[in-house]
Amino acid sequence: MTILETRPVVASGWMRCPGCGDMIYRKRYDRGDRVCPECDSHGPLTADQRIAMLLDADSAQAVVAAPTVPDPLRFSDTRGYPERLAEARRRTGMPDAARCVRGRMGGVAVVLAVLDFRFFGGSLGAAVGEAVTAAAEAALADRAPLIIVSASGGARMQEGILALMQMAKTSQALQRLDEAGVLTVSVVTDPTYGGVAASFATSTDIIVAEPGARLGFAGPRVIAQTIGETLPDGFQTAEFLLEHGFIDFICHRNSLRDRLTRLVAMTVAEPAMSGPADAPGQSDPVTDPDAVPERDPWECVRAARELGRPSTLDYLSGAFDEFIELHGDRLAADCPALIAGLARLDGTPVVVAGTQKGHTAAELSRHNYGMPTPAGYRKAARVARLAGKLGLPVVTLIDTAGAYPGVAAEERGQAVAIAESLKLFAGLPVPIVAVITGEGGSGGALALGVADRVLVCENSVYSVISPEGCASILWKDAAAAPRAARALQVDSGSLLRLGVADAVVPEPSGGAHRDPVAMVGRVRAAIARTLTGLRELSPDELSTARYRRFRAFGRIAGEQPDAVSPGTPTDDPTFRDA
């Protein structure tokens, strides 16, 4: 259990750090929001301290919750429950373990629900459940983001089964926010266990944790005593949770307000998208297949694999105004081959997901050579669902040889993860733009390629299989890869002619790797222009057009009354003036 108060040592101005045990000056500790200046461990804060730290000054207004039954079981152990409640109220100055307020964060209206561990270990009883539910209802009424700061030992035993019911009660309240498209954010602090961990602390859109914060259903002591299992180092800490895909990011307390402010502003504020300004040397997307310079497809394959080509991270830093990365599939892992998060493009919030390779051997290895695992596709699906909930456009950046084919990936359902992604993207009620920035390898690329518009960089390729794989299977000779590339028609001109691509983004002379900055600018302009046209369409119009787009592939135009041909790219109103 976290130490909440430390006794003065030698003099009242000094104390021992609850984390490292070193002597520290109490006033310095408090001025630093109770973060140890020696070991950086994050000590506990009261609910009022949290509110003051996170909200704009003087903006907090209490959210009043309905009264609850004070002692439903007439519970008593060595002392009566009412007596213990009265003592906790005197000691903390709080009616119970949760404080809920409306307020502003960087000028954006939010609702904040904060648990205070001093009050019965922040346990979830009827009063806490009612307070969190009232906060969710206030967020629904205001259509304002709900931010929950948790610190809890679990459900309150003194209230028995009614305490357990609060898990379902608060979950229902969060579900209503999902249906209404209201952002929910959980801030996990140390410790957060039991019923709180298994309900509102982990069922939000985004989960942030302070460094070292512990989160789990059963605590280490319970696990060890119940089944005698040896626990790994750092078990259930924020760092452990990030590695295993359960949280989006770890945020130091001194930057928490700034990160949350950026987050809520990015998902709430939505100014109209302005047209991209033309930059010197930029070229418009090409929609006429005959206007695409003819190149040998094998040369395009080689150019697409150039390590100097801009990667997804390069586009995120150069083509978008701002980016907040989100991590984890909420199941088991965080795939480094797939980068996903919230971004701004010309001031408009968007969701971005893309495969990441790298420019050096070390980067390639760190990002699994751009081949996503099932966790990667499930992470992309998670942020895509967030986009659908919040009504934000989706941009995907594709550069992968394909999905990772290893044993572990198969054990974790690689095929199922890709299938789920295809179906999810097919039904998203928001605009989707996919950009093939390098290689588009098989189903691993298509999992991010079900889109309203597909842009292909001039030297990029997109294929059912790699030329080497095709050559090995059909020619029985991997050296026949150039011949296979030509037969597969993997080049951008062919993709445009087949209707798979809607436009080709010209590359600088010699290829994107010769002038990455210029290439990033061209892709930015193409995405912005494409989204401008798509944002004029309703969700129903987007869904119908997307269905017809993919319904037509492989069919002969006009053979059936409802047949829809991919058509010529010049029929696309998005690029009519290009």
Image: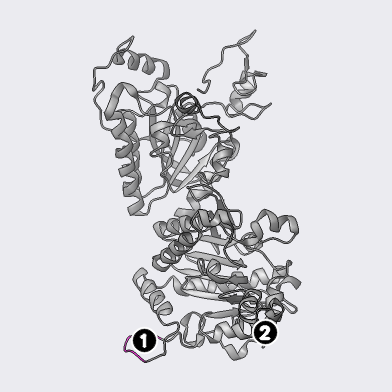
Q: Nearer the viewer, residue 528 or 125?
A: 125
**Residue 52 seen in the current view:** no
Give the amino acid type for the residue marked by disc 2 in the picture.
Arg
Q: Nearer the viewer, residue 410 or 240?
A: 410
Q: Which residues are magenta?
A: 559-564
Residue at image mark 1: 563
Q: Please say if the residues under marks 1 and 2 sit with CB atoms less than 8 Å apart.
A: no
Q: Earlier in the sequence, mark 1 or mark 2?
A: 2
Q: What is the total number of numbered labels drawn onto the structure image? A: 2
Q: Position of residue 204 (x, y in %)?
A: 42, 45
Residue at image mark 2: 483
Displayed quadrant of residue 120: top left
Query: What secondary structure predominates along the stretch shown in magenta?
Result: loop
Taking the spot 33% from the left edge, 17% from the top edge, the residue there is 85
Taking the spot 53% from the left edge, 20% from the top edge, the residue there is 3
Near mark 2 (Cα within 10 A), the count class, few <14, some 14-19 or many ≥20, is some
Give the amino acid type for the residue marked by disc 1 in the picture.
Ala
Q: Position of residue 335 (x, y in %)?
A: 57, 53
Left or right of residue 236, residue 205 in this image: left
Q: Secondary structure at mark 2?
A: helix
Q: Nearer the viewer, residue 558 or 7?
A: 558
